[in-house]
Amino acid sequence: MSDKHQTEPIGDVDVDTEADPGGDPSVPAPGTRLSGLALGIDVGGTGVKAALVDLATAKLVSPRVRERTPQPSTPEAVAATIASVVTKVLLGQDTPGELPVGCGLPGIVKNGRLASAANIDPGWVGWPATDNIGAAIGRPVLIINDADAAGMAELAYGAAEGRMGTVLLLTLGTGIGSALFIDGHLVPNTEFGHLEFHGQDAETLISGAARERRKLGWKVWARQFNEYLARVELYFSPDLIIFGGGVSKEWAKWGRMVKTRAEVVTARYLNTSGIIGAAWAAGAVVGGGVAAAGDLLAAGMPDDALGMSSVDDPGASRPHDDG
Ligand code: BGC
């Protein structure tokens, strides 16, 4: 990998789970290394996954629990699955009540709700996700777009660690997710999977699921994908493009056919970037004090990219013991 944009990590921040929200928080910039534990949840079109993450190393310190996304994937049904997965992850774990919890969702995240739902039930749009998922798991939760979360993981610990310049992560799975960073600052909710491509949403023609549905061989798919990448490069001129999601596991079959001006790499965390990034984002907020979500704006993460709930239930601060 070229090091022309390499910089030192921006700094280290302890996740202070006792942080005084009214205090003087030190607000980490995206890509900053954190420490302490956080819980990451990744909701996809096919699976709901979660694990406890050590924020110093990005290592999973619990089993990664996965359950199928219920069909239909209504918000209530998915929230119940999230609660089930979280309960299993935390079973027997000695975690603080104020454990930061982040949840990646496959849509535009605005003000604690989804503003779009391409690969999940449309009932998610406008549903108070931050509040209701927080209530379902009995803990405050931060919600973030799933691809933005994956990008955060790669920026903090992975293929884009410490990178400046314009960095684009594309997740190629059921849909196409995107995370765009400019000098380490996230431009949230970019949704490049929905760029118009041959008169349709790009992801309906060239996502991983679309490749299978259309029965495209790798060569034909790569040719169409290159056409899409050329469009993206024309618009945004990324310095580095990172490919994540299920299709990236098959890199050996198509990587040599990719044609870009930008440097390209595969994500370091293929199965877990959504979990790690959601945990990182939650840790970054709690590390600066829960009230500091808006302050993250100053560090490059617009606050409407985040939704932070509070849970009033007094039992909420206990580790899960409700089965
Ligand atoms: C959604 C994005 C999401 C991506 C990957 C797209 O259909 O619109 O928000 O990041 O799928 O899940």
Image (cartoon, grey):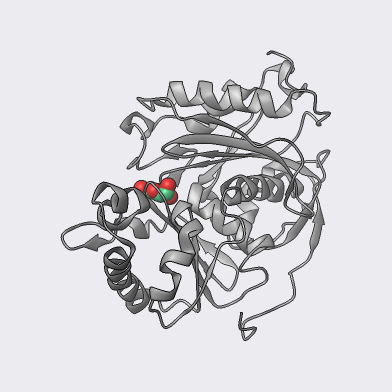
Q: Is residue 105 left or right of residue 220?
A: right
Which x, y percent locates residue 127? Answer: 41, 29
> Looking at the image, which residue is at 77% across and 23% down?
319
- Can residue 179 be seen in the rendering of this structure? no
Q: Which picture quadrant has residue 307?
A: top right
From the viewer's perspective, tell me whether residue 139 is left or right of residue 187.
right
Q: Is residue 159 left or right of residue 193?
A: right
In the picture, which quadrant includes the N terminus? bottom right
Q: Which residue lies most toward the bottom here? A: 4
Q: Is residue 253 left or right of residue 225?
A: right
Q: Residue at x 42, y 25 (%)?
A: 70
The furthest residue to the top: 322
Question: In which quadrant is the C terminus drawn?
Answer: top right
Is 234 situated above or below 189? below
User: For residue 126, which quarter of the picture?
Assistant: top left
Q: Nearer the viewer, residue 129 or 149?
A: 149
Residue situated in front as seen by the camera: 216 or 140: 216
- Find residue 182 and report its horizontal and vertical position in percent: 53, 71
